[in-house]
Image (cartoon, coloured by chain):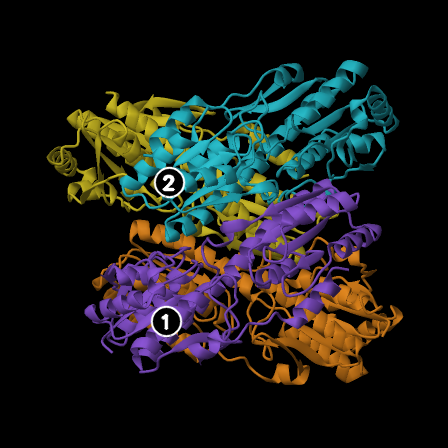
Chain colours: A purple, B cyan, C yellow, D orange
């Protein structure tokens, strides 16, 4: 291959810029050129393209978001949209495409492969860490650190006022961020969609913690499990604890990527590019522990990432 | 004076620990002892006291919140409560009291002086910066930095997705945090209770920014001016901009104090203590620019801090 | 005036980008154009110019360093160099120039005024805070926070190992950073060029602190006062304390500017521009406490900024 | 087992407090008691012991360093010292010991097992990440993030002044921190003890980068590979690049642990404790990717951790 395309697609995640940097430099170091399309698949369809040289991906490794910008494309969900995208890729001389994004974006990549036999490679970028075939998605570590730093701040004021705080973190369909941030934040309870819970039980747990001498507590809840405000109301009505809630929201998406996410992005971006240039296709780069792996997109997209049972047990024993 | 008391009272603010450190060490360096009461006035009433030595205020200068904890006391609002507090102070041998807190806490201090002729000194601690007689209250600079760092994160994702974000910051009765954080965060619009605004005008401003090529915008709103969610809804219904909102909430209260707040807290805590030990009473320590000042509590509490008109004009010219 | 120039010059300081943003937008909002020259005076001489529109200063308020880059120019120190610079400014249609930088850079501006009657305005940008006529220079607050965060980290390990740490911070000719960072970092001793000190006295102080029960201590030293390594060696040879040293160095120059520095930069940049466009010249914008002021460059450059005696006394009483 | 001891030993690492918290709470949740000894093995020998309840390990998960303090013990290196330590452990009723520390500390644990048949378990705590049998040691991720944030700051000023910066990071015997921080920091060259390098080659690389348009560069060097100052001198004498150097030093040891290090510490501390209470001994808890593992100390201590060849190749292709 002499030329490939690259997009960031779907929700943005810290480290996407580092991944684009890796795609560009890995390609250049093998003598191939890279075309960057803005706004994900939508930008391919409208041919928002620019050649990416080494200098253009300099000085971006520490930046949050994605300088290529991102979008969700309705047009690409239609067969006509995908055909248009395919044609634009050919017009630009791109013999393959690296897609950096989450489940939906990787599904789009797989369709390009299946419908047009077009070589694609996926790089998992998602703060939710809900993509199978890799232990970590790009952006997860940063999002967890952002949440934990916010929890640390809230604990200062929870301690000072002897209050209960309910903190809602991102995770519509899963509790990966909540579990990790709750453990690292020293939360007394962590509520996630994967595990049934009862708010009266949470109240009992808070009461028993108070009897052991704890004068302030933190409850972390994934947005997909319950609304922080509802839990706060229930606790206030059913216990004597003064309770407040905080919804962290979109600030979890941004920020300078952590060292972990930068190195992960470099490794996965470079690997996906190297394999694409070597003739592989239809895979997603990932890590199995410290080792690089590459799984078929069809496998990745048909498998659901499971919450770690060891961490669930750990969470219980740590909150005593 | 041979012995004085100290409390932190009302809402907690980063830097309160540094202020207590300064009270203790300034007193010790003049040969006086210090008694710390937990939970503000409530803790005086219930005699939750401990002698504070130099070592006990070591290693706390970098900690958010207040290790003395804080509370709002209903009992202290009654004459009986205050008499009880006065008696406990005498029982502990405290010949004066330093109160670190906001408007309400300083009002309590003034009552102790007026009703019992008891020597008190105030130190302004409030993230809202709404206390007269000082350019800065302890905690404001940290809270603004916390808000600005959150805005920076949100801007990453606003940029990547080309969205409008409405960010609600603390400030129930005033816009000091919103104005400072909005300026420092490069917000396109800043909405505060002190200045009438129209949301349709904000929409017009966003449209005109978009016409000039701006593809994402940040609106900062003080909680006392409007709810971020309402503004987001209005913008979404009346413009073509994809809009999201974030409510920063209580995380703005906590966190390790900034260098500015630590030095401010040391200076004000030491000054209040030195003046109390020298026989002054009924004042609040403050800064006028870089200079220390001490104003009568009666003056401080009867004057309202005004928003800075220069900053309002600046905000308009910076958002073009 | 229809068009003005702007440069950043001398040592870079966090907040310089915000200052350029303010110059550009303040000018645009009054109908004037702005030309940015790269690399300070050197870039004027070689006509490295670009028109600065509003969009070009968007998204830079949170960035450290200066996107216009900076340099020290030997050519500008010659009369021929300055004449060349003057001519280039005229060729570009610039009727005035805003110079953002430290003492040396402001001296250059004054020469343009004196030799060619060319309208200039100065904006104080210097992490050292050694410029007269303003309580704060742009970059100082950020540099102090950077140093304090490093001190906080070092204190963790000093505490864990019960060691003495000597930390060298920037400040070749003065101790502004050292004094502020030492106070905020809770240092046991602060050594600055302005105040004579004796290292044996420091050892005595450390011994007495150890006798009172302190098991670890921090000494902060300005690079202009002594070398951290030398002080460490002396302490190790003359006490029983295990001692280590750290030289913070250039990392104090960079980083995202603090909220304080951003707002300061916006205010000073806008004020200097507004006054230049209104016909004033030969001044430097500054703050006296919370109020904007504008002093003649001749006054600013002939006056030396003094260390605050109140802080020196405070430092003594806080380290007991 | 009814009662176990715990120490932190050797160099401190961020996350050690979280590890102690996990040991205490994992033991309590199984009905066993925990005794904490201060100052590592030295504190066992001198019986500096305290019972650790759940409340004593509350509020420390976010703190750098180790509240148990740490030390290197010469006495423990003698047979008499170890016998004394063994006796003190028995006197305290401790039926086993969890040792949190690096290679040297784990060697000490193994000796207790071998000489006295005393049950020990190790938890790897070391910012250097040089311990075999685990992908990550506690503290490494935080130290790398600290280094990367410093590199980010330095890059601001490197960019503004168009300079080369040589940054020395920790790592006396290996380049794990340097390689990870160099990759994440976008360094142009990374020099580590494991890989032979030539400084003239580095100069050639910098020259070729300059020819491609790069106007500033970062070189990261492990302290065990070369002194930053020497490299800076060589570059200044043999190229035309203005060059500066920074030695990050001990600030890399401290700071609030990252989310990754906190969760890692909880997992490893809990696992070591659970296995010790279940009758296992002489092992070290570790992670193999995302999975917990437990290897014999004898294996861990006789194996050397290797630098990752994939990252070395990545580093080359990323700096073009």
Residue D72 falls in image quadrant: bottom right
In the visual, does D263 lie left or right of D232? Answer: right
Residue A318 falls in image quadrant: bottom right
- x and y percentages locating residue A166 in the rendered image: 66, 49
Residue to which mark 2 is pinned: B239
Q: For the C terminus of chain D, give its image quadrant.
A: bottom left
- x and y percentages locating residue B201 in the rendered image: 38, 30
Q: Is residue B99 above or below residue D190?
A: above
Q: Is residue A83 above or below residue C236?
A: below
Viewer-side label of 2, 1:
2
Q: Residue furthest front?
A: A79
Residue to which mark 1 is pinned: A109
Total residue callouts: 2
Q: Is residue A266 visible?
A: no
In the visual, does D222 lie left or right of C303? Answer: right
Residue at 23 percent across and 69 percent down: it is A87
Distance from disc 2 to disc 1, alpha carbons, whole Å, reads 32 Å
Circle 2 packing at 10 Å, graded few (<14), some (14-19), many (20+), is some
Q: Is residue D309 visible?
A: yes
Residue at 58 percent across and 52 percent down: it is A149
Dot 2 falls on a residue whose secondary structure is loop
Q: For the N terminus of chain D, give its image quadrant.
A: bottom right
Dot 1 falls on a residue whose secondary structure is helix
Residue D240: image tag: none
- x and y percentages locating residue A273 in the rendered image: 34, 74
Do the numbered discs 2 and 1 sit on residues whose CB atoms are within 8 Å? no
Report the front residue among B226 and C58: B226
Residue at 60 percent across and 33 percent down: it is B138
Report the front residue among D101 and B124: B124
For the residues beneath circles 2 and 1, the answer to whether they share a chain is: no
> Which chain is home to disc 1?
A
> Which chain is home to disc 2?
B
């Amino acid at each position: 291959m002499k030329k490939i395309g690259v997009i960031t697609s779907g929700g943005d995640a810290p480290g996407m810029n580092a991944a684009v940097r890796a795609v560009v430099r890995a390609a250049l170091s093998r003598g191939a050129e890279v075309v960057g399309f803005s706004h994900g698949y939508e930008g391919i369809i409208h041919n928002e393209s620019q050649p990416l040289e080494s200098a253009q991906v300099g000085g971006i490794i520490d930046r949050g978001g994605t300088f290529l910008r991102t979008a969700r494309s309705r047009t690409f969900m239609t067969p006509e949209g995908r055909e248009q995208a395919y044609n634009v890729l050919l017009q630009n001389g791109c013999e393959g495409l690296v897609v950096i994004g989450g489940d939906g974006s990787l599904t789009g990549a797989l369709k390009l492969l299946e419908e047009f036999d077009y070589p694609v490679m996926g790089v998992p970028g998602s703060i939710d860490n809900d993509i199978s075939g890799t232990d970590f998605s790009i952006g997860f570590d940063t999002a967890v650190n952002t949440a934990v730093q916010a929890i640390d701040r809230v604990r200062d004021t929870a301690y000072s006022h002897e209050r209960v705080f309910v903190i809602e973190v991102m995770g519509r369909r899963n509790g990966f961020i909540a579990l990790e941030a709750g453990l690292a934040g020293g939360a007394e309870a962590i509520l996630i969609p994967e595990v049934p819970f009862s708010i009266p039980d949470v109240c009992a747990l808070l009461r028993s913690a108070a009897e052991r001498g704890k004068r302030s507590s933190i409850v972390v809840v994934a947005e997909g499990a319950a609304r922080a405000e509802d839990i706060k109301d229930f606790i206030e009505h059913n216990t004597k604890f003064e309770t407040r809630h905080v919804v962290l929201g979109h600030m979890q998406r941004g920020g300078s990527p952590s060292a972990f996410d930068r190195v992960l992005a470099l490794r996965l971006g470079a690997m996906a590019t190297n394999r694409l240039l070597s003739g592989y296709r239809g895979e997603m780069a990932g890590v199995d522990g410290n080792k690089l792996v590459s799984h078929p997109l069809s496998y990745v997209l048909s498998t659901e990432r499971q919450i770690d049972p060891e961490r669930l047990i750990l969470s219980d024993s740590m909150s005593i």
